[in-house]
Image (cartoon, grey):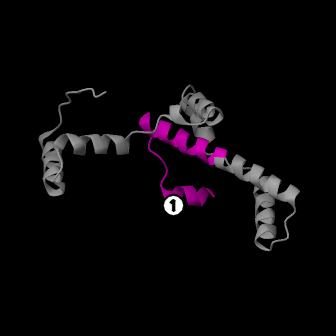
């Protein structure tokens, strides 16, 4: 189902959209739809239940709590354990129990990164400037 939205845009923006449509042999509507799709954060409804519920919970947080999530990290001991297990895996000296532990730790690291990314997306959409890559690396 398609909905129509009438949105006034400044003339220079409209001209840019028209020019891009012409240059790519696509309709103006298609260009606008692509631009909106690319710029809006993904809504987590289509994710597996556990992940979806975790991300939807972020939407109810205030900005301060979101900043805490965005700036969180996997604990140092967990990062060290992942590194050790990855090294053992690369050397083919990892046990089955260690492989299971590595998968569990990697899943937790993925969950932390997904939460951070969604928290940053929400903060951006709430109007907050996000740190640059250099600023994030400096905090590292």
Residue at (78, 69) in percent of width and height: 87
Q: Which residue is mark 1?
A: 134
Image location of residue 75, percent across then percent down: 76, 50
Judging depth in this view, the residue of 55 and 97 nearest the camera is 97
The secondary structure that most of the magenta stretch takes on is helix
Q: Quadrant of the N terminus?
A: top left
The answer to whether residue 44 is visible is: yes
Where residue 52 sits, quadrant-wise, is top right
The answer to whether residue 77 is visible is: no
Q: Please, is residue 89 above or below residue 19 in the view? A: below
Q: Quadrant of the C terminus?
A: bottom right
Residue at (35, 41) in percent of width and height: 37
| Relative horizontal placement of residue 87, taking residue 52 as reference (left or right) | right
| Relative horizontal placement of residue 63, taking residue 22 as reference (left or right) | right
Within the magenta stretch, is there residue 120? Answer: yes
The stretch in magenta equals 111-140
Label 1 neighbour load within 10 Å: few <14, some 14-19, many 20+: few
Q: Secondary structure at mark 1?
A: helix
Q: Please, is residue 139 above or below residue 84 in the view? A: above
Image location of residue 137, percent across then percent down: 57, 60
Q: Please, is residue 96 above or below residue 87 in the view? A: above
């Amino acid at each position: 189902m398609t909905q129509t939205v009438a949105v006034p845009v400044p003339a220079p923006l409209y001209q840019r959209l028209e020019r891009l449509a012409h240059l790519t042999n696509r309709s103006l509507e298609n260009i606008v739809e692509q631009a909106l799709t690319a710029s809006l954060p993904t809504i987590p409804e289509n994710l597996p239940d556990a992940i979806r519920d975790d991300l939807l919970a972020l939407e109810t947080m205030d900005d301060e709590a979101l900043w805490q999530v965005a700036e969180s990290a996997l604990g140092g001991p967990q990062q060290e354990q992942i590194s050790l297990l990855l090294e053992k895996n690369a050397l083919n000296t990892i046990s089955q129990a260690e492989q299971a532990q590595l998968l569990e730790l990697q899943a937790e690291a993925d969950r932390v990164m997904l939460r951070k990314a969604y928290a940053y997306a929400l903060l951006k959409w709430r109007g907050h400037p996000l740190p640059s890559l250099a600023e994030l690396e400096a905090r590292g």
